[in-house]
Image (cartoon, rainbow, N blue to C red):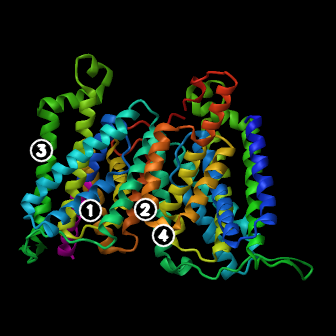
Amino acid sequence: MNRLETRGVLLFLALAALAPLVITDQFFIHVMVMVFFYAILASSLNLTVGFVGELSLGHAAFLGIGAYASAILSTEYGLPALACIPVAGLLAALAGLVIGLITLHLEGHFFVLITLAFAEVLRLIVNNWIEVTRGPLGFSSIPPPRLSIGGHVLMDFSSRVQFYYLALAVLAVTIGVVLLYAQSAFRVGAVAVRENRRLAKAVGIDPFRQALLTFVIGAFLAGMAGSFYAHYITFVGPEVFGFSFMVTMLMMVALGGKGTVLGPLLGALLIGVALEYLRFINEIRLSVFGILLILVTMYLPQGAIGLLAWRRMRKAGIVKVSAVTR
Amino acid sequence: MLETALQFILNGIVTGCFYALVAVGLTLVFGMMGVVNFAQGEFFVLGGMLAYVATVQLGLPFYAAIPAVLAIMWVVGMVVDYVLLRPMRDAHMLSTAMVTIGLSIFLLNTMLLVFGAEPKNILSGFSSKPIFMGGLLITQSRLFTIVISVVAIIAVHLLIAKTRVGRAMRAVFQQKEAAALVGIPIDRIYRFTFALGTTLAALSGILLGSVFVASLSTAELTTVKAFVVVILGGMGSFAGAIVGGLLLGLVESLWGGFVSTGYMDVIGFALVIVLLLFRPRGLFGMAEARER
């Protein structure tokens, strides 16, 4: 974590907090709400993909669990939406613990495939377990959040701007968690495992525990994102478990720069804006995404943030190639 | 009761043939090149779509369409390997996986643009009149599928076991540095293997399309199921992929027939998750699990 990055993150948050004061365009506000939602997701995925170095293709499962938990708790049990968000996060974390305990013993390819299998199993269960999940119909008219003190309603989330700040608040919590993680001894352990598993074990780091805790934190954050999504979109169906969310988050992490704090935010901003403003090329959008993912992986493995860092280093006259090979 | 069970077993064998062909391609590419090909399901669907173009739009007879489509898919495999995989030979496994994921997204959505979302019929020219074998019934196209699959699997086995290319493939599989040292052009062996895997997936797609329909919506599930088969059979194991494919086909068919069709697709995943809980190295113990 360098100073450039901390400043970048703070700048991002400050600009985001001030933006609605200047720009009141409703569509812009909506786009930014989605960008924040994606930024939470991408940051949470990045914990496992970027810091531990394992490719999880099942991350959409935690998004889905969070979204469904929130949908069921608020429509069937009347739990207030603002309470749903942390509860959904905890439920997703619990699922993350179970899935992580099973999958994280597996290496590389196995881990990739089994996490994907878990997401598929959950999607199929949600599609078929109609008594609880309402099957393919999903949940509609999920109530919006409401903030009141002593019967006095402070915020009723009837306007988009209030959702904007709610999303920004969840994103700020996410960034806080990720920053804490990135500066902890824990992350050093995770990176040590990523770079050289055997050496890390030799100095007393337990790779499994490192990976599991990271995985569970990521699940928690993704669950909160899912809950927010449920209340903002007001509809949740089995597609939240689908591969397209997974692909979008993965793109954001890859394009922004994996293993950094700022990278997923940048990726979410670039792709989130492109997604919403390029609706008119909706049809070829995903084809372009596919090509973009290939090109970024082959020619820009460090993502956009790698490009920035590299230019800075070149300006400072430091020619250093080996440190950025991963 | 017994006849119903036998009928489900027969249906399971047909489905198992589709799985086995796709999985053999996947496992060869993985074992030889260490590449997890996430686009295998898209190659499978592309085969079916091209067969639709050949038989319906161009009016080619089915027996001529099959080799034509396979030849095209062979070239597709060579090009993909040359353009996308060759530059990534020394890259980390995750990077290569991301490239094949990108390819799968590109192929699926481009096919959606070109062919549309609705399922396509392939004109195979077989009559739909079933053949009765004792109390069991099988359609001509299903019988054809079983025969072609068996022929293809035996052909690939002979190719690997008896030919010069096959010997080179086995050498690369065992030790690629040593293979390169004795003068085997490993880059060309890789390209050959990948093209072979692509073609086998396409063959499976053509056969499935002639029995049912060719549909884009099957691509993702096919990839994931092929992975399930490969894990069941042990990564990189040729025989394992065939056994695993037939096993998955049978279990799905019996489960769907006797228990519930809704959860049919879950069975494979459940099987793999349970298997990995107890045997993290896969059914045949071929692959390495993470050292604790």
Asked if disc 3 and disc 1 are in contact, CB closer than 8 Å, the reply is no
Amino acid residing under circle 2: Ile
Mark nearer the viewer, 2 or 3: 2
Residue matched to label 4: A125
Quarter of the picture containing the N terminus of chain A is top right
Asked if disc 2 and disc 3 are in contact, CB closer than 8 Å, the reply is no
Location of residue A74 (image quadrant): bottom right
Q: Residues within 10 Å of mark 1 (few under 14, many from 20)?
A: many
* Chain identity of mark 3: B
Q: Residues within 10 Å of mark 2 (few under 14, many from 20)?
A: some
**Residue visible at 78% across and 71% down?**
A162
In the image, is residue A90 above or below residue A295? below
Q: Distance between the residues labelled 2 and 4?
A: 31 Å
Q: Are both tags, 3 and 4, on one chain?
A: no
Tell me residue A27's x, y (percent): 66, 71
Amino acid residing under circle 3: Ala
> Is residue A313 rendered to the left or right of residue B172?
right
The question of residue B18 being in magenta is answered with yes
**Residue visible at 58% across and 29% down?**
A324
Mark nearer the viewer, 2 or 4: 2
Residue matched to label 3: B155
* Chain identity of mark 4: A
